[in-house]
Image (cartoon, coloured by chain):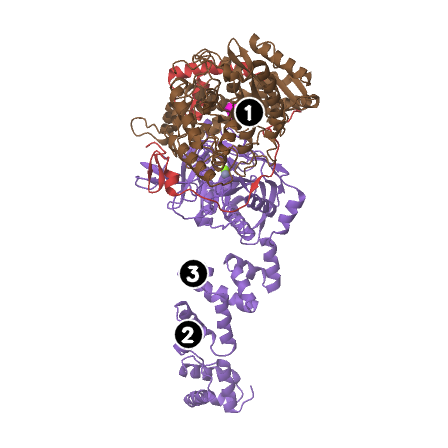
Chain colours: A purple, B brown, C red
Amino acid sequence: MSTATAEILSFDEAMEKFDPVLGFEVHVELNTRTKMFSSAPNAFGDTPNTNVTPVDLGLPGVLPVINRVAVESSIKIGLALGCKIAEKCHFARKNYFYPDTPKNFQTSQYDEPIAYDGSIDIELADGTVFTIEIERAHMEEDAGKLTHMGGATGRIQGAEFSLVDYNRAGVPLVEIVTKPIVGVGARAPELAKAYVAAIREIVKNLGVSDAKMERGNVRCDANVSLKPKGQEKFGTRTETKNVNSLRAVEHAVRYEIQRHAAVLDAGGTITQETRHWHEDTRSTTAGRPKSDADDYRYFPEPDLVPVVTDDAWIEKLRSELPEPPAARRKRLQADWGYSDAEFRDVVNAGVMDAIEETIAAGVKPATARKWWMGEISRRAKIADVEPAELGVTPALIVELQGLIDAGKINDKLSREVLDGVLAGEGTPTEVVSQRGLEVVSDDGALLEAIDGALAAQPDVAEKIRGGKLQAVGAIVGGVMKATRGQADAGRVRQLILERLGVEG
Amino acid sequence: MTDLTRLSAAQLAEKLSSRQVSAMEAVQAHLDRIGEVDPAINAFLHVNTDEALRVASEVDKERSIGDAMHPLAGVPIAVKDLIVTKGQPTTAGSKILEGWHSPYDATVVRRLRDAKMPILGKTNLDEFAMGSSTEHSAYGPTRNPWDLDRIPGGSGGGSAAAVAAFEAPLALGTDTGGSIRQPGAVTGTVGVKPTYGGVSRYGAIAMASSLDQIGPVTRTVLDAALLHEVIGGHDPHDSTSLTDPVGALAEAARNADVKGLRIGVIKELQGEGYQDGVQARFTEALDLLRQAGADVVEVSCPNFKYALGAYYLIMPSEASSNLAKYDGVRFGLRVVPDGAPTIERVMGATRAAGFGDEVKRRIILGTYALSAGYYDAYYGSAQKVRTLIQRDFDAAFTQADVLISPTAPTTAFKLGEKLDDPLAMYLNDVATIPANMAGVPGISVPGGLADGLPVGIQFLAPARQDARLYRAGAALEALLEDTWGGPLLAQAPEIAGVK
Amino acid sequence: MPEITREDVAHLARLAHIDMTGEELDRMTGELSVIVDSIKTVSEVAGEDVPATSHPIPLSNVYRDDVIGETLTNEEALSGAPDNAAGRFKVPAILDEE
Ligand SMILES: [Mg+2]
Ligand SMILES: [Zn+2]
């Protein structure tokens, strides 16, 4: 077995000597109600082997029937990736024996994918746009789920036996395959992450997948090869399987680049093989090398008939497509009047949707940004969650901001109100009254505090009377201290000036 | 009282609906007959006594209270053991499925149940329908009721022998390269392969998906039409199922008349390679048809000579993939070698022990034909030949309404005679395979005897024109029965060893 | 077409997951050679311009609506299984110990 920590070269040195070539196969699980070829529910997390029909177990005599919605979702993905849609395509059988594959062949598409020749623009964090060419997007079915038992690690290695649940067998998949990605250089890991994020965003936006990577709705196989600087010919590639978080995609590509570089730099050769990603050690280990056992003996699936598309069908599906994410971003930035930098920060923080909803609920764009990029992001960071997962709703922000605008609370108090709301003490209004946080708006009480502050600092009072208006801050500070912050600073200032008979 | 087992299904149905005979009596008569002759014939792998009698009693009850019933309600039927049946074992004639019970019914079985036709049991076959003699069954060969030393044809020898031996009036078969028609020919019974897609394949254990078709096995052409109407028609569980209505098949059989019918004699499917007696009966049949007013012409199908070769690439290729699921994981046999074997080794040992020689031969051949570097030359080329065969049919059907040929080149051969010579065995299907390759329907009707053994005459029709088969088949049946003075099976000898 | 060798058959048997004894391999090699020899002309019959037929009766666009149907119970699903545990199909180790 290969050790988990093979020799690697530093990333910078690797980049000095080699150019990386990337390629991705991303599997997207569709969120249809039923499976690709059977009427069993396409559902996650149910009792094992209950979301199955005889078809999903590959029992003797069964036949597949194609799910129309799965085909339409696949076409939508193709359209969103700028692909051509095949006028006619068919399914094929990919023959190989594995216990999670009930028929010992996967029904997939081979020489005629439903969608081909597309491209998408990927925007990196600094705004650089990189175009990735899409080779194809094809329909296929998922396999069952294996649980490895009896070993120390729960891994396939060293297991005594395995258990198979076919609930996932036959779930519709679309496999999206890129053309080789060249010329990305040191930004390869970043691009890898951004590409998978973009695919996830596209399929989620289309509504065709739940797109939850942690549930395996989007799974990435990352191909990496290196070529010495200046060389045209591609090097031998490895395929790192099932890299299933955005962070892992970035790290796996970086690791494989460093590992390849070390091997090549030492005069070695790369073996064409699959690699397994290990999150714990952030490294890959060797899987199965390519062999003549990979003779899949593809042939057209005789139990299914071809999918034939026409313009009317495609145009109907095209008309159902939502606004593409990139176009939507452009539109929102213009609507909100954010600068490029402000908008990029919003996108990178993952709060664009939240801001859109907050604005829709009636908050000004600048105010919505202040909330999400300020207080909410700060709290999310401390809690180590995404800002959107903190439990702050647009309605809550509307109410909080309303209290501020009405002069009932100030910015500082609003944080305390938020604490109370998140602690489950009720609505902002309820928290304000229960915690007694309302600003002191009773002029009598304020005037008492002002008189106290003026008496405590007679020299300052004199300066103000003499026209030095900037000195008023010191008196305001005294009043705020006396009211424990529960006063509206603007109102306090106004009252001080009135008291001293000075024009503001 | 008449022997109920000697009645045709149509005759029995008539007696049942007029309540001259009860379904219980009809089923019991056939169960008794099975008990008597099947030890000698071995047509049945499983006899479904309790359920068949229960369904019969339900039919009698419903009929007694005057419920409207399907015309064939109460008429018993045997089912080839390649078709899955809930509540009964299904083996496909293989050790690998010994003891397996399907948790679901095939669509055709559901239709039999809906019509309240009692299922007598499951009939023997070559393992996974791979063979032309039923000798490749893991459960022993079936014997031909005409001569117990001879084969009943295959793969559906069990269904054909059961019907020929009066153990059942009706049976279901499956036909991938002739497995309904060739056994029909050598046992003196009627067998129909419907248009591909005319009868749902859902629940028929697949050998070669693009060739397989379920069809009727009967003693008369009318019975075949009646059964075809029960099992035929669209099924949403089969993507290759046609949406066309089944058509008025029984009506075509009842109004049999060949006057003005253009019958094309396929030049390539006669003469050399065909036994003299077979050729003689065929020529006599043509004379009778001509005398009855048919317009008999000769047609040429030059690409038929490649059909057998192309078939022996397509069939094993599809079969190698269809049979991959028998691996000891989800159902059926599991063989665990000594030590602590991996699942891979368990699969290898299970399939080695569970499959017979012919199945292994075809899986290996199919694996070869699909493997990298050979696909274009073999599977791809065979599919092109398929196109050429289809073109031959298209051209022939511009000259003729139906085509005609002997069903099989020889009468029943002796058990064991061709067992060690796969190629000689494969040649039995030379006349039946073209129909499967093109998806067109075919029927085999009894054509007389050669040296005391039955000869079959085959009609072929264009796709979706199954009714023409029943018209032509019933007409020839009537003409021949006139010359014989009754059904051919009336001439069959008593089954040896049976009192 | 090249000759079919015993090694070819051994490879095919591995691909097909069928264990074969030496005697079986010998016999199968002979039989396969005879069969392939008799059908190899098929590859020379049809020209480039002849399209392939994969379905005897051409149909297209046969679909199912995305509506949930009847499923098997866990008990029915496992009813034919050679071995099971915890509601799942039980299989021997997938990898050899290394
Ligand atoms: Mg892949
Ligand atoms: Zn895939």
Name the chain under label 3. A
Mark 1 and mark 3: Cα distance apart in space: 74 Å
Q: Which amino acid type corresponds to the residue marked 1 in the rendered image?
A: Val
> In the depicted view, which residue is nearer to us: A22 or A86?
A86
Residue bearing the label numbered 3 = A381
Answer above or below: position of B251 versus A457. above
Question: What segment carries the magenta color?
Answer: B313-317
Q: Can you say whether A98 is above or below A321 in the image? A: above
Identify the chain of the residue marked 2, using the numbered disc in the image.
A
- Whether residue C18 is visible, yes or no, is no
x and y percent of residue B48 in the render?
39, 30
Q: State how far apart marks 2 and 3 are (Cα).
A: 24 Å
Residue B315 among those drawn in magenta: yes
Front residue of A405 and B440: B440
Magenta highlight on residue B88? no
Question: For this rendering, which residue is in front, B309 or B438?
Answer: B438
Q: Which residue is mark 1?
A: B192
Q: Secondary structure at mark 3?
A: helix
Q: Secondary structure at mark 2?
A: helix
Residue holding disc 2: A431
